[in-house]
Image (spheres, rainbow, N blue to C red):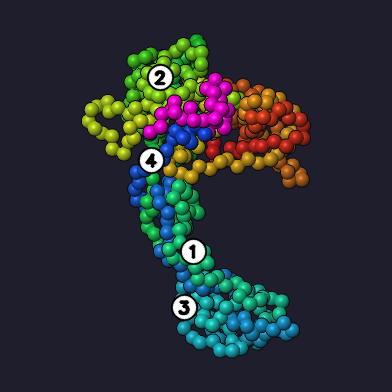
Amino acid sequence: MTSIEQIATELQGYDPHNISAACVHAFLTRLVGPVTDSQDVAVLDALGRVLAQDVVSPVNVPPHDNSAMDGFAFDGAQLQAAQPLRLRVAGSALAGKAWTGTVGAGECVKIMTGAVMPAGLDTVVPIELAQRDGEQHILVQPSAVKLGDNRRLLGEDLRAGQPALRQGHTLSPASLGLVASLGLPTVRVVRRIKVAYFSTGDEILSLGDAPRDGAVYDSNRYTVFGLLTRLGVEVIDMGVVGDNPALLKAAFLRAAQQADAVITSGGVSMGDTDHTRAMMKQLGEVAFWRIAMRPGRPMAVGRIASADLNNNNNKEHKPESAVLFGLPGNPVAVMVTFLAFVRPALQRLMGATVTEPVLLRATSAEPLRKKPGRTEYQRGIVTRKSDGTLSVRSTGDQGSGVLRSMVEANGLVVLHHDQGNVAVGDAVDVMMFDGVL
């Protein structure tokens, strides 16, 4: 296992006192590797799970040439450019039943969508384009179809032996349908990772606690719970831990013993005198950063050994260490650092193919202040203008403690490291919340 010090040494431009977002991503790519344990689960239980191996199609999809339309199937070689084709209807081919009759020259078969194409027939004229010519005949105009139209070929979607889904794919509703279409009742997926999280600080109140001067109710645990649940991991809520060395030590050890990753909020600023930062250093191998970004400047990342507190060797499927993410205490900073860094790192830990957020282009409806040399994520409200283009305006106060602004926003304006001030009408990148928040 590569040490954190070695990773830092090998990274170009690594500076813990002013580390760029790009360098953070490079660091986490080296630090976090995928879990390897896997299991077979039923298709109906596989939504959101990550494939541990390729799903290889055991069959051709579709399994036979079939009609893509309700219409009339015929031999397309009979089409003529100058005059309509007159065909006698020899019978009907229904979905789920192969046509057993014979079709001669000048004949066609009425066919339903999905029905097997009768032998020798390769073209389907949609029923609405076929003109009736008496009781038993139709006319096909020269412009209606061309040879091969409206026929789905055997194996044109998937060939037997071809990978249908790749290892690392996160199974979506469409993926479940694809697996089922192959006749596979189960899929092999990576085991669901466990993530423990807790808030730190004597000033943090849990729900149900009586208010007191100088204290605030914990919001971060509920935000992190939502973010983790959306990601599809098994969440372990460890509550609030006060600024007490013994309590913090016990919480860190218990979290590392149970989980693959541990997330805390609060206590990671460079100038903090509380016990959280010291306990992280005591129990693990941790890097403390000041990231060139806003919000979310302070962050800690590392590993904590997952000692068995009960000495009962109950560490089945558990790595020797848990990945640690020490996030800032301010609510918006917690969410932004999670989206920017923790989410892709956990995707990597899950064995999933890491997906970069899709950035859309929008014009700014107002001037935005930005200093070059750091990445900024400003909360924005994105709307569509009458000409179809996107426009974005700020939610107002961008303080990292203004949680209300994250509720009002539907995306983040991503102002990149080297970017400066933005004028009205300038194009900016926006990261939409849909699907991640």
Label 3 vs label 1, nearer the camera: 1
Is the Cβ of the residue at disc 3 closer than 8 Å to that at disc 1?
no
Number of numbered discs visible in the structure rendering: 4
Magenta-colored stretch includes residue 11: yes
- The foreground one among 41 and 307 is 307
Residue 93 placement (x, y as % from top left): 51, 78
Mark number displayed over residue 158: 1
Q: Compare marks 3 and 1 and give the one earlier in the sequence.
A: 3
Residue 421 relative to residue 323: left or right: right
The residue to which callout 4 is attached is 35
Region of the chain picked out in magenta, as a range = 1-25
Q: CA distance from mark 2 to mark 1?
A: 52 Å
SS at circle 2: helix
Establish if 57 lies above or below 202. Answer: below
Q: Compare marks 4 and 1 and give the one earlier in the sequence.
A: 4
The residue to which callout 3 is attached is 98
Q: Compare marks 4 and 2 and give the one earlier in the sequence.
A: 4
Residue 165 placement (x, y as % from top left): 46, 55
Q: Compare marks 2 and 1 and give the one earlier in the sequence.
A: 1
Magenta-colored stretch includes residue 341: no
Establish if 64 lies above or below 278. Answer: below
